[in-house]
């Protein structure tokens, strides 16, 4: 198995997760999961079979969007072209899923890959190679940008360099995405949200997706300061909400970064407990961005160290219980479908979806 840097993610314990199971709430509600990973790392594997087991939790998971995680980069060739290997690998998984042999799920219907945007305009050949590798599914790029100077705050095995979002070369590379009809996913901590704002203002024609609720930090220098962090985070999110090219993924609070410590209990949390903890963040985002610009995400298998897939989606459904039918349709599928240009039938009731996709 390939070697990898030490993982900062909470270890997954399947036997522990199995201690709490729940029937799905609103099992007929169409769901598109816009954020998950696939990888094969030393001591940590999450591949198509694992995703299938998680998504078969009773929720109507119609499709997923894969997000780059340095999986299956090419071992040889020009350095800037090696990430195309990940798109080739994931497109193969998508084709496997699209065969129908594994059920109705359309895994990796959208693919967000990696290209070094600090190449500036020279990133164009890399983007073209990604598009050739998955012409029907490749939708965007994400770089490793989540940075904090405190060594206790790290969510990626490979820590990025400081100030990447402010790099003029990165800005030029990101501008190339809009020209190619691609999106930009950004994983940044709440301390970096002013940098995200500056980038979004500089590139108004680029659709930018802010991952994991904008990364409110609850560890390291911010441990025990949840209220203070929440205020700072919310002020930044309100400024971002004024920019129409921003979208927000609602999830990612299963990382140790959040400061929640559900994984330390004798039994895993139920959806009611998670909904209580997450609601302040999720509800504020929906309030200021609107449901049409927000989408629930699993962030699996990263978040799986704290809770199971089925419980995760039940928590989201509890938080959205008072939303209108149109708002739920957007939060659970519609926003993801529009943002990543996925087939529209994925958000329709099951009978209508099957008729249109036949």
Image (cartoon, rainbow, N blue to C red):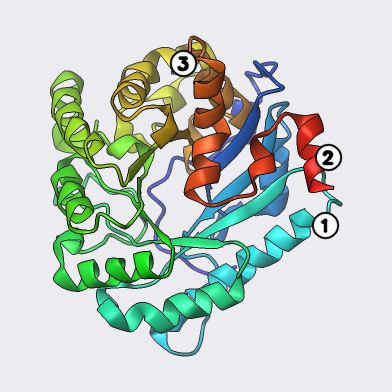
Mark 1–mark 3 Cα distance, whole angstroms, equals: 34 Å
- Residue that badge 2 annotates: 355
Q: Decide: marks 1, 3 in contact (CB < 8 A)?
A: no
Asked which quadrant contains residue 122, the reply is bottom left
Q: Is residue 106 left or right of residue 90?
A: right
Counting the numbered discs, the total is: 3
Mark 2–mark 1 Cα distance, whole angstroms, equals: 17 Å
Q: Position of residue 26 (x, y in %)?
A: 66, 17
Q: Position of residue 23 (x, y in %)?
A: 70, 16
Q: Is residue 203 left or right of residue 110?
A: left
Element class at badge 3 = helix
Mark 1, Cα crowd under 10 Å, few <14 / some 14-19 / many 20+, is few
Labels 2, 3: front one: 2
Mark 2–mark 3 Cα distance, whole angstroms, equals: 31 Å
Q: Earlier in the sequence, mark 2 or mark 3?
A: 3
In this rendering, the answer to whether 97 lies above or below 292 is below
Q: Residue drawn at (67%, 50%), measured in percent from left and top?
A: 107
- Residue that badge 3 annotates: 319
Labels 2, 1: front one: 2
Split into 4 quadrants, where in the image is the N terminus? bottom right
């Amino acid at each position: 198995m390939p070697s990898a840097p030490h993982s900062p993610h909470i270890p997954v314990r399947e036997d522990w997760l199995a201690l709490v199971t729940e029937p799905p709430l609103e099992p007929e509600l169409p769901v598109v999961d816009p954020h998950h990973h696939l990888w094969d790392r030393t001591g940590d594997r999450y591949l198509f079979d694992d995703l299938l087991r998680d998504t078969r939790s009773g929720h109507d998971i119609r499709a997923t969007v894969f997000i780059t995680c340095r999986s299956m980069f090419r071992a040889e060739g020009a350095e800037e072209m090696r990430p195309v290997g990940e798109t080739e690998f994931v497109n193969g998984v998508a084709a496997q899923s699209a065969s129908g042999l594994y059920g109705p799920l359309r895994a990796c219907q959208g693919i967000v890959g990696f290209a070094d945007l600090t190449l500036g305009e020279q990133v164009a050949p890399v983007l073209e190679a990604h598009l050739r590798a998955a012409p029907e599914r490749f939708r965007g790029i994400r770089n490793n940008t989540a940075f904090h100077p405190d060594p206790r705050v790290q969510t990626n095995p490979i820590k990025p360099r400081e100030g990447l979002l402010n790099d003029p070369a990165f800005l030029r590379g990101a501008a190339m995405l809009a020209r190619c009809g691609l999106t930009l996913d950004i994983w940044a901590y709440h301390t970096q949200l002013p940098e995200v704002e500056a980038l979004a203002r500089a590139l108004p024609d680029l659709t930018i997706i802010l991952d994991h609720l904008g990364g409110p930090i609850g560890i390291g220098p911010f441990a025990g300061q949840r209220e203070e962090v929440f205020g700072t985070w919310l002020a930044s999110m309100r400024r971002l909400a004024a920019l129409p090219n921003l979208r927000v993924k609602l999830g990612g609070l299963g990382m140790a970064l959040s400061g929640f410590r559900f994984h330390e209990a004798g039994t895993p949390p139920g959806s009611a407990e998670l909904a209580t903890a997450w609601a302040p963040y999720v509800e504020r985002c929906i309030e200021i961005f609107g449901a049409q610009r927000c989408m629930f995400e699993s962030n699996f298998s990263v978040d799986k160290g704290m809770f199971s897939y089925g419980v995760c989606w039940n928590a989201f459904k509890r938080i959205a219980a008072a939303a209108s039918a149109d708002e739920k349709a957007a939060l659970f599928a519609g926003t993801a479908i529009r943002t990543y240009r996925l087939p529209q039938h994925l958000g329709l009731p099951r009978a209508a979806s099957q008729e249109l996709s036949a």
